Image: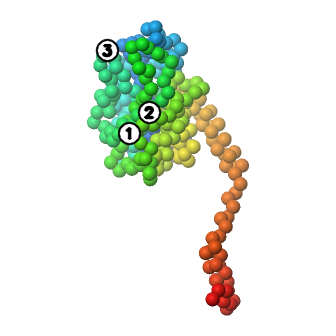
Amino acid sequence: MNHWLNQILQGDCLTQLARMPEASVNLVVTSPPYNLLNSSGNGMKNGNGGKWSRAALMQGYAGHSDAMPHDDYVEWQRECLREMLRVLTPDGAIFYNHKWRVQKGLLQDRADIVEGFPVRQIIIWQRSGGFNHNPGYFLPTYEVIYLIAKPEFRLASKAGGIGDVWRVRQDRGNPHPAPFPVELAQRAIAATTAEIVLDPFIGSGTTAVAALLEGRQYVGIDLSEEYCRLAQERVARVEAKLDSSALAKEPDEPAAPSALEVREMLIGTAEQWGVTVWP
Ligand SMILES: C[S@@+](CC[C@H](N)C(=O)[O-])C[C@H]1O[C@@H](n2cnc3c(N)ncnc32)[C@H](O)[C@@H]1O
């Protein structure tokens, strides 16, 4: 695994995952392309019914159009989930972030993607809304995270208390068109005892950053050379910051002994010299 650890690998995730040994990572945190541009509404619209031209994703991703025929998209994502499960240890789990939507009056709740996979729970990610106000709709403010877990998966001690609605603000200033916030990935990672975290659609490197901040190792994959470079640079900046703050930290003071420990030390010394300290 050393070949893979703490690397951002450029390439198609199915090809890269196929090279990884089975049961080699403990956790997957990921957000795939949502296939947003295969849309009956022709992508996102603004309040006047026209295209929301400033939406970053109107162009798709660098290297991926995000407009596959629906059935092909579903089969692709199912194949990705199968591969993620193959490389997961028996106590591993996948946090799979996706978005529900309605197309031509029919709900796409992504059930066709996750059907037959061991979905243990659905977490709601409550995020801030965008600016795409439309008089026909309430402003969308949530996405979902499917927790797909192998039988031996358990949360870290007391982590379950954070509940299944996670209120986390979206990222700002990230040049990637569809990043999730570091805090979202960090919550998922911190809620587990996983040592190695994989993201097969790592984009700007958010999952790697979250893994580093939580003291874990990561493996990241993305199709786009541009995003891989972005992710590598971002990860290097975070690593440098973590290193410099570790260096700046004073060495830990030895803890002062408790009164009881002092008494025991004195009694030990006194006994050694045949003296009684306390009656
Ligand atoms: C929703 S974005 C992930 C964003 C990421 N969570 C972040 O915070 O930056 C999906 C990513 O999947 C990548 N992608 C598309 N097709 C891919 C493929 N076949 N293999 C690997 N990555 C792919 C895109 O380049 C894009 O960066």
Q: Position of residue 277 (x, y in %)?
A: 67, 86
Q: CA distance from mark 1 to mark 3?
A: 28 Å
Q: Nearer the viewer, mark 2 or mark 1?
A: 2
Q: Nearer the viewer, residue 80 or 142?
A: 142
Say which amino acid is labelled 2: Trp
Would you say the residues marked 1 and 3 are in contact, meaning their CB atoms lie under 8 Å apart? no
Q: Secondary structure at mark 1?
A: strand
Residue appearing at x 49%, y 41% in the figure: 187
For disc 3, does the CB lie below 8 Å from ligand 1?
Answer: no
Up the image or down, 240 lies above or below 173; here it is: below
Q: CA distance from mark 2 to mark 3?
A: 25 Å
Residue carrying label 1: 147
Residue appearing at x 71%, y 54% in the figure: 250
Q: Nearer the viewer, residue 126 or 223?
A: 126
Residue appearing at x 35%, y 50% in the figure: 152
Q: CA distance from mark 2 to mark 1?
A: 12 Å
Say which amino acid is labelled 1: Leu
Q: Secondary structure at mark 3?
A: loop
Which comes sooner in the sequence, label 1 or label 3? 3
Residue carrying label 3: 104
Residue carrying label 2: 125
**How many residues crowd mark 3 within 10 Å: few (<14), some (14–19), many (20+)?**
few
Q: Nearer the viewer, residue 263 or 84?
A: 263
Q: Is residue 70 left or right of residue 259?
A: left
- Give residue 27's quadrant in the image: top left
Up the image or down, 209 lies above or below 132; here it is: below
